[in-house]
Each structure stands twice: as C-alpha cells, then as structure tokens.
Amino acid sequence: EDQVTQSPEALRLQEGESSSLNCSYTVSGLRGLFWYRQDPGKGPEFLFTLYSAGEEKEKERLKATLTKKESFLHITAPKPEDSATYLCAVRHGSSNTGKLIFGQGTTLQVKP
Amino acid sequence: NAGVTQTPKFQVLKTGQSMTLQCAQDMNHNSMYWYRQDPGMGLRLIYYSASEGTTDKGEVPNGYNVSRLNKREFSLRLESAAPSQTSVYFCASSELGFLGTEAFFGQGTRLTVV
C-alpha cells in the first residue's frame, strides 16, 4: 500500500537551534516528492520538488534532501517566522493524473 | 494573478442541507483536485479531474459529487450534508506530465455541519 509517514508529529525548537524533519515513503515508482508549508488558516504553500535519490534543494534556511526511502527537510538556525506545519507529499508511478499522497505533517514551533 | 480561488471561505450547514463549493484557477492547469483536511488525518483526496471533461474518485468520495465546468472551474457538491463532513476543504490545480509537477492550493473552505 502506498504510504507517506512524517516524523515527528510536533517539534519545538529554540531560535537558532537547527534540526531535521523526516518523510518516509513507500510507493511504487516515485514521480516526485513535494514539500509544502502550511500556516494556520491557510492553504499549503509549495516549497520544493525532488525527483531522484541524491537530489537536494535549498531555500533560505531550508534544505530538502531525498533518498530512495525518505526525504529530510533540514532547518538551519530557524527563526520564529519558520513556525508552521510542514507537509510532505508524493506522486507515484501508477498515477498518471497528478494525484498526491500526503503525510500527516510536522508542526514546527520556533521560540525566540 | 490570483492562483486558485475558493468560495465561500466559511460555511455552516444543517444536517441534510446541500451546498456547492466553488473553485477556479487562472494558471491554465489541466488537472484540478478537491482535498479535505481533518486533524490527525492529513490531506485526503476526494475527487480529481485530470483534464477538462474527466473526473474520477479519490480516496474518500462518498457523499460528494463534482463537476468540471470548464478548464478553469471545478466544483464540489454535498447533496445531503452530514456532521462527518465537517472539515476544511482545499481545491488545488497542477499541470500534467510524466514527472509530477507541484500542485497549487486555494485558501480553503471551512465547513461545519451541525
């Protein structure tokens, strides 16, 4: 069964304390892994797409990496404005329609 | 450039009432989707439309119907609302392609069924 699991469910960091969020997936033929940020009361906002193992993408304090079984979202020296829920989603080989399978998300709180 | 626009933003329904959630995108995308988001459940796909003129069921289609009115618009209808349909509903759109492209989401409709 295609599945996406994110850990931890919640993460509290002090400002400047770097950490990583994990997204493990089991799908048949990965056609893309996507990271989104979601603020309370808002829709998910696209961050990154990764297609193949070894690929990395960076944006400000965020860096996403991909292996054959999981992806990590590394947050370096986070600031309070990085507080949000981070969602991971995958598109798999049997889906020719663009459908995404989402994990349950990691809620990040960064304290000043 | 508005992206994906959903209406209404908030709605309260009584059990058994019907309503239609509207979604429009201005990015000329072929594919559109309806998701619901519940605490602890993540985003789950209700229905999708791979291209204009086609619709198909997602993971949780029971109690819903959809219409792909044209390339821009994709509506979600609740024929007889139930408390279990209390949720936040998101519409999204994306391009097609062998390699998946990112989906863009609207701001959501917060629906309460009492």
Image (cartoon, coloured by chain):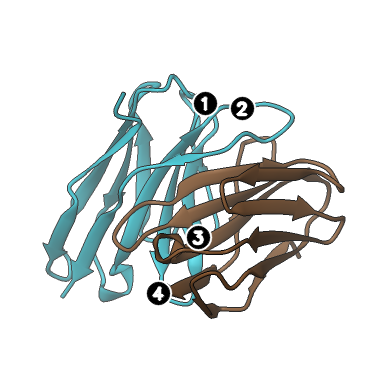
**Of tags 3 and 4, which is closer to the observer?**
4
Mark 3–mark 1 contact, CB under 8 Å? no
* Mark 3 or 1, nearer chain start: 3
Q: Quadrant of residue B72?
A: top left
Residue A104 location in percent, x, y? 55, 69
Residue matched to label 4: A112
Could you confirm whether marks 2 and 1 are on the same chain?
A: yes
Quick one: label 4, few (<14), some, or many (20+) residues within 10 Å? few
Q: Is residue B6 left or right of residue A25?
A: left
Residue matched to label 1: B51
Mark 2–mark 4 contact, CB under 8 Å? no
Which chain letter matches label 1? B
Q: Which chain is brown?
A: A
Tag 4 secondary structure: loop
Q: Quadrant of residue A102?
A: bottom right
Could you confirm whether marks 2 and 4 are on the same chain?
A: no
Q: Amino acid at mark 2?
A: Leu
**Of tags 2 and 4, which is closer to the observer?**
4
Q: Amino acid at mark 3?
A: Arg
* Mark 3 or 2, nearer chain start: 3
Tag 1 secondary structure: loop
- Please tell me which residue lies in front, A31 or A20: A20
**Of tags 1 and 4, which is closer to the observer?**
4
B62 up-or-down from B67: above or below: below
